[in-house]
Image (cartoon, helix red, strand yellow):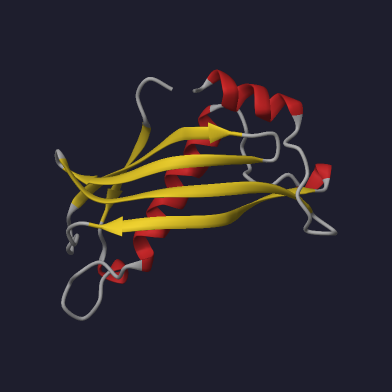
């Protein structure tokens, strides 16, 4: 993927603590939205695939907070495919305020069986779409 996929985010009162600063876990929510919309842009409306007995779940997340966002900030959440395996995809993600990165992370998402919760291969069409987006 030459340019990271991104979506706009507005910081609302519900995203902040009593001091008007974005609560740390909300950056993960913003990243989730960007990943979901990236997959949607590739033609897949749902990140889970229950009709196929599969789920996409977060395996791990490494987050670095650089600056805090505040009430009413206009942000941008980006997602790019960093590494693609048969059963997992690693996303490189950033939260921007204007041209400044205020938070960044690496999030690994695994494909698991809905009933056993054990890893399994991504369906070929999704794997191919992700591979083409790199």
Q: Which residue is located at x 62 percent, y 33 percent?
A: 44
- The x, y position of residue 48, in whole percent, is 68, 47
- Left or right: residue 19 versus residue 30 is left
Q: Which residue is located at x 64 percent, y 34 percent?
A: 85
The residue closer to the viewer here, 4 or 8, is: 4
- Left or right: residue 128 versus residue 66 is right
35 shown above or below 1: below
- The x, y position of residue 57, in whole percent, is 63, 54
Residue 21 falls in which quadrant of the image?
bottom left
What number of labels is visible? Answer: 0
30 shown above or below 4: below
- Left or right: residue 23 versus residue 46 is left
- The x, y position of residue 87, in whole percent, is 70, 40
- The x, y position of residue 114, in whole percent, is 80, 55
- Left or right: residue 8 versus residue 45 is left
40 shown above or below 100: above
Q: Which residue is located at x 38 percent, y 20 percent?
A: 2
Q: Which residue is located at x 78 percent, y 44 percent?
A: 120
Q: Residue farthest to the bottom?
A: 18
18 shown above or below 57: below
On the rendered image, what quadrant is the N terminus found in?
Answer: top left
Residue 116 falls in which quadrant of the image?
bottom right
């Amino acid at each position: 993927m030459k340019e990271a996929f991104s979506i706009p985010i507005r910081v609302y009162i519900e995203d902040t603590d009593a001091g008007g600063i974005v609560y740390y876990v909300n950056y993960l929510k913003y990243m989730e939205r960007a990943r979901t919309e990236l997959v949607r842009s590739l033609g897949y409306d749902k990140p889970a695939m229950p009709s196929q007995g599969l789920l996409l779940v977060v395996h791990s997340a490494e987050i670095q907070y650089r600056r805090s966002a505040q009430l009413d900030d206009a942000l941008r959440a980006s997602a790019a495919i960093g590494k693609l395996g048969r059963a997992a995809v690693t996303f490189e993600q950033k939260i921007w305020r204007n041209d400044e990165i205020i938070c960044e992370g690496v999030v690994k998402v695994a494909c698991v069986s809905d009933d056993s919760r054990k890893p399994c291969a991504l369906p070929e069409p999704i794997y191919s779409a992700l591979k083409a987006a790199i």
